[in-house]
Image: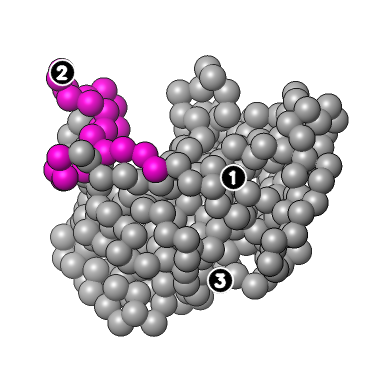
Amino acid sequence: MSTTTTGTTTKTTISTSTTDANYVPRGPTSAELTFYAPPPDNAQPFNYVESPPPGQPTRNYGEDTQRVSLNDIRGNESSFHLDKDSFQALQDVSSATTYATFDSDASIRENYYPEVEALIKEHIPGVHKITLFDHTIRRANPDSRRQPVNRVHVDQTPTAALARVNLHITNPDEAKALAEGRYRIVNVWRPLSEEPVQSSPLAFASATSVDPADLVAVEHRYPNRTGQTMGVKYNPGQKWYYWSGMTGRERLLLKCSDSKGLRDGDVSQWVPHTAFVDERTPEGARPRESIEVRALIFG
């Protein structure tokens, strides 16, 4: 193990030859993150969610790999808030779920969704309606269909967020009324296991450090509709964080859109995030397994 100090930042590096399979990387570090690079022909960037049509690539934009400093929020969790940073860390969350809860979509909706809804009501003031519209399980395993996403992105654009309101609120009059108030999309992220995350942790940038000019709308093409996500261009002013050793008793709230921020600018709107390869991960570490539940929140 070696420690170096540059300016006011201390970086600790653990050799990748670490043999303690139970070691949990913690503290400030640096990692290579994959940012957005525009299509060579400057065309509208797109990404196909499933197999692209014949002759089309899965995506038409490129990658810009940059090494960035990452600060560990462990021990400073209360310093960050959804309205300011677009992320918030919750600890000591009680849950009746077990690892087996996440074996099927039906079990997740029946047993975990009610906990997510209760969590949102407890920690996000002013909410009067919640619609949980999607979830994804990711496993850092070569055989898994959905693995951690190692690409900096934001899940929604303002246009896509409004489209979600109209898609998931099926009564047009209700959707119109709700869209005139405050609506947000927040992802609730957690590991599946009680054991601390050792590999493929999640990095996220405080919204206070993100220039809107760094965000690029990307067409997210489903088989039956087209949504939008955002690619994120590298900017050295961005402040990146991660939460070391997250367990199944902790939750990370990630705000992907906020109509209040769009309308009056007094709260943050979105949080760029990505999985990353932590070079300190020990040999034989547990593959990261996680679930993110996506919520439309009104009020």
Q: CA distance from mark 1 to mark 3?
A: 24 Å
Q: Mark 3: which secondary structure?
A: loop
Give the position of the N terminus as an image quadrant.
Answer: top right
Report the disc number at residue 54.
2
**Residue depth check, mark 2 versus mark 3: number of the one nearer the observer:** 2
Neighbour tally class for label 3: few under 14, some 14-19, many 20 plus, Cα within 10 Å: some
Q: Amino acid at mark 2?
A: Pro
Residue 173 location (% of width, % of height): 16, 65
Marks 2 & 3, CB-CB < 8 Å contact:
no
Residue 71 magenta: no
Name the residue carrying label 3. Answer: 81
Label 2 to label 3: alpha-carbon separation: 45 Å
Which of 297 and 84 lies nearest the eye of the viewer?
84
* Residue 177 in the image, given as x and y percentages of width and height: 22, 71
Q: Quadrant of residue 281?
A: top right
Indicate the amino acid at tag 3.
His
Measured Cα–Cα span from mark 1 to mark 2 = 36 Å
Range covered by the magenta-colored residues: 41-64
Residue that carries the numbered disc 1 in the rendered image: 31
Q: Residue at x 70, y 68 (%)?
A: 8
Residue 37 in sight here: yes
Q: Secondary structure at mark 1?
A: strand
Report the number of numbered marks. Answer: 3
